[in-house]
Amino acid sequence: MAGSFLSDDEASEAAEINVTPFIDVMLVLLIVFMVAAPLSVVDVPVNLPASSAAPPERPEDPIILTLTRDLDLSLNGAPLLGDALAQSLLQASDGKRDTPVLIRADRDIAYGEIMALLDRLRDAGFLKVALAGEEKAP
C-alpha cells in the first residue's frame, strides 16, 4: 500500500485485541454476584420489629416461614396454600422434625396470630423455632 506506514507483519499485530482486561473485569463481576446472590434469598417483604439483643449464631439451613401483614404464609419464599403447613415443612426438612424453623412475621400482626402459628408448628412436631427481627442501631 502506498500510504501505509506499517508493514504487513506490524499491521497484523496491531489488529489483535488484548482481552486480558476484559477477562479481569468479568471475573471481578462474577465474584461480586457470587457474594451478593445468597444475601437476596428471601424476597417476601415483611416489616420486622427491631431487637436490641445480641444476634445468636444463625443455624446452617433453617426453614424460613414468613407471615405477612395479610396473614399469608410462605415457606422459604414460596406461598403456602390452605392447611399444607405440616406437609410442606416435612418436605422442606426431608422429614427431619429437628430442623430449625425461623419465623419472620410483620410487626403489625396480632400476638394471637403468632401464637396460633406456633401451635401449628408444635402440632406438626417442629419444636426448634426462632423469631426473626431487625437489629437496632446502637
Image (cartoon, rainbow, N blue to C red):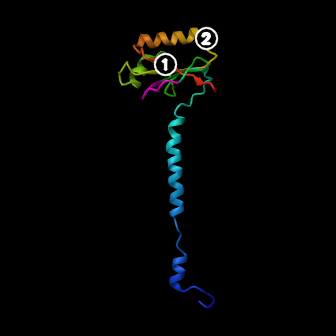
**Residue 82 appears at what percent x and percent y?**
50, 17
Q: Which mark is residue 130?
A: 1
Q: Residue at x 54, y 62 (%)?
A: 21
Label 1 is placed on what type of residue?
Ala
Indicate whether residue 64 is drawn in magenta: no
**Residue 125 appears at what percent x and percent y?**
39, 13
According to the picture, the residue beneath numbered tag 2 turns out to be 110
Q: Residue at x 47, y 11 (%)?
A: 120
Q: CA distance from mark 2 to mark 1?
A: 17 Å
In the image: residue 9, left or right of residue 70: left
Counting other residues with Cα less than 10 Å from the Cα at mark 2, is it few (<14), some (14-19), or many (20 or more)? few
Magenta highlight range: 55-63
Label 2 is placed on what type of residue?
Ala
| Image quadrant where residue 47 sits | top right
In the image: residue 10, left or right of residue 60: right
Q: Which mark is residue 75?
A: none
| Residue that extends furthest to the left in the rendered view of this protein | 95
Can residue 78 be seen in the rendering of this structure?
yes
Indicate whether residue 56 is drawn in magenta: yes
Can residue 84 be seen in the rendering of this structure?
no
**Residue 11 appears at what percent x and percent y?**
54, 81
Position above or below: 66 against 112? below
Q: How many marks?
A: 2
Position of the C terminus by quadrant = top right
**Residue 117 appears at what percent x and percent y?**
51, 13
Question: Magenta part mainly helix, strand or loop?
Answer: loop
Counting other residues with Cα less than 10 Å from the Cα at mark 1, is it few (<14), some (14-19), or many (20 or more)? some
